[in-house]
Image: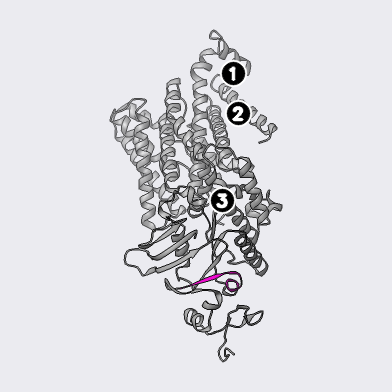
Amino acid sequence: MSRSRLALLVVGVAACLVAGLSAGSVPLAPGEIWAGLRNADAPASVIVRELRAPRVLLAFLVGGSLGVCGAALQAMIRNPLAEPYLLGLSGGAGLGAVLAIATRAAGAWAVPIAAFVGALGAVALVYRLSLVAGRRLDPRVLLLSGVVVGSFFIALMSSIMVLSDSAATRNAFLWLLGGFGSSSWQSLGVFAAYAVGPLALLGLHARSLDLLALGEEPAQYLGADVDRTMRVVYGCTALLTAASVAACGIIGFVGLVVPHAVRTVARPLHRSLLPLVFLAGGCFLVLCDVASRVVVRPLELPVGVITALVGVPVFALLLRRTLT
Amino acid sequence: MIVEARGLTVVYGRNGRPALRGVSCAVEERRLVAVVGPNGSGKTTLVRALSGRLTPQAGTVLVGGRSVAEWPRKDLARQIGVLPQREEILFPLKVEETVLLGRYAHLGPLAAVGEADRAAVRAALERCDVAAFAERPSDSLSGGEWQRVRLARALAQEPRALILDEPTASLDIRHEMELFELVRRLVDDGLAGLVITHHLNLAARFADRVVLLSGGDLVAAGTPAEVFTPETIGRVFEWPVAVPRWGGEDGSPQIVPLRPGESAS
């Protein structure tokens, strides 16, 4: 990448982070943010340090992770429409998380584990369903079963939430719509701890993803261990999705929109694509979070609503392109 | 002997008809083997078995004297480069990047692309005459150009043997000839080659040996002149043919399908 492009990227990321820190029910100027970050006694200090900084960082990390999930899944199942939400991973993770909360079985660190189990369950079910349809795995059938399984899990999840009499569980409903309103340094820490491993592992498999994107057969002939790479990708994306659902609820379409947008600018190999998608995904979700705070101030829209409002038209466009 | 198959039997499904039945063949350095036969005769199955993609019910495949199943995929990719029949482009890359993917088996997950890799890519691009459009996206190429790029990618693997599954399907005469000439030169320069093709006449002119399959059985194997007789070809392809020679008495046999009422003479 050229130096000017790199500079542009750094400036872009910084601008998004500043926008994230400044927007909200109390808008802050960059000067106030700077003072709040440097000086604990500054008027904006509490807002910046305790509320917005963890929120913006969490949104950035989650956005980046979901983007990377989308890029990896798209390469693996060779379908530009693949992403955690449409493949049913998010639904499975949501069901797992809600079950853990409803049965009061889990604290902040254990909810992601329950979500992970749910996401893996969804993967297994989606895989099984697509194999029923035919002996060879068809990427279109895989996606279709993903949508079906995801919807089924979300329906189960909603029933549990409505039937449960605990107020805490009902509040979980708002959380599952996707939002960063309750972000804290703790939730940021939990997410980061779960996300760093799978992100690194996916990065290590960047070259294998290049090969998998060619198709299973050419990938194998070029030396890729296809089965192992697929297990790694399913495991890592399930864990990343689970951690993000536990941190901020179900947010769809980030993994769809972001890799697609990056690919229209550059068509790089995954060693550059994955980091670019991570940064772009982070910026995208921070900006969506800003929009969720600004559009109907002082109320907040769930950020999942914003990503869906952006993502669904992109999905429709991509669908048209892949089917023609 | 680089790749050797002994008594291969492959059955798809549980009680299906064997796709291959006791087939043996060998690919050695500086020799080009052409595998021919009607549709469904087991040609592509043979490629998959030779390259370790499927496990035969009986028989063995040896690569460098060692069973193909024992080779780790990466090491196998340094021994055999395979061009499968179909490959759709979903996420287009630049031609140079496409060829660089051939270096996968030589690169660790964190290793940077080194001078040896760059040299191998450059050599492969030039060898296949695609260096001129190294910067073009792969989805802007013609069918013949794309096949040469894929061949360059296989060469970047620096294999000892090349296995090509119908490399000239849907190419016109010029691109077909260019590809066969290229493969022949690569084989003359030291590679072992196995090519599957429907073009019997090209197989006769370019290959050292021909393996004729029919319904999973090896019907004939030998030099083109030994295999391409009017009786054998007529029987296997279920159509009468004449087999004149191109370029005199010792020239390569060329197959001419006959129309009703025509005779071989």
Q: In the current view of this chain or complex, which residue is farthest to the right? A: B132
Q: Which residue is mark 2?
A: A13
As helix, strand or loop, the secondary structure at mark 3 comes to loop
Residue B206 on the magenta span: yes
Q: Mark 3 Cα within 10 Å, few/some/many (few <14, many 20+)?
A: many
Residue drawn at 52 percent across, 78 percent down: B226
Q: Residues within 10 Å of mark 2 (few under 14, many from 20)?
A: some
Is A249 drawn above or below residue B248 in the view shown? above
**Tag 1 and tag 3, C-beta contact below 8 Å:** no
Indicate the secondary structure of the residue bearing disc 2.
helix
Q: Where is residue A231? Give x, y as percent.
A: 41, 43
Q: Quadrant of residue A94?
A: top left
Tell me where residue A176 appears, x and y as whole percent: 41, 33
- List the single residue furthest toward the top: A41
Q: Is residue A247 above or below residue B174?
A: above
- How many tags in the picture? 3
Residue drawn at point x = 53 percent, y = 51 percent: A214
Q: Is any part of residue A267 visible from this angle? A: no
- Tag 2 and tag 1, C-beta contact below 8 Å: no
| Residue marked by disc 3 | B157
Position of residue A171 measured from the top left corner of the image (x, y, whole percent): 37, 28
Q: Which residues are magenta?
A: B202-213
- In the figure, residue A278 lies in which quadrant? top right
Identify the mark nearer the N-term, 2 or 1.
2
Q: CA distance from mark 2 to mark 3?
A: 39 Å
Name the residue rendered at 67%, 34% in the picture: A5
The type of colouring in the image is: one colour
Q: Are marks 2 and 1 on the same chain?
A: yes
Residue position marked by numbered label 1 in the rendering:
A28
Distance from disc 2 to disc 1, alpha carbons, whole Å, reads 18 Å
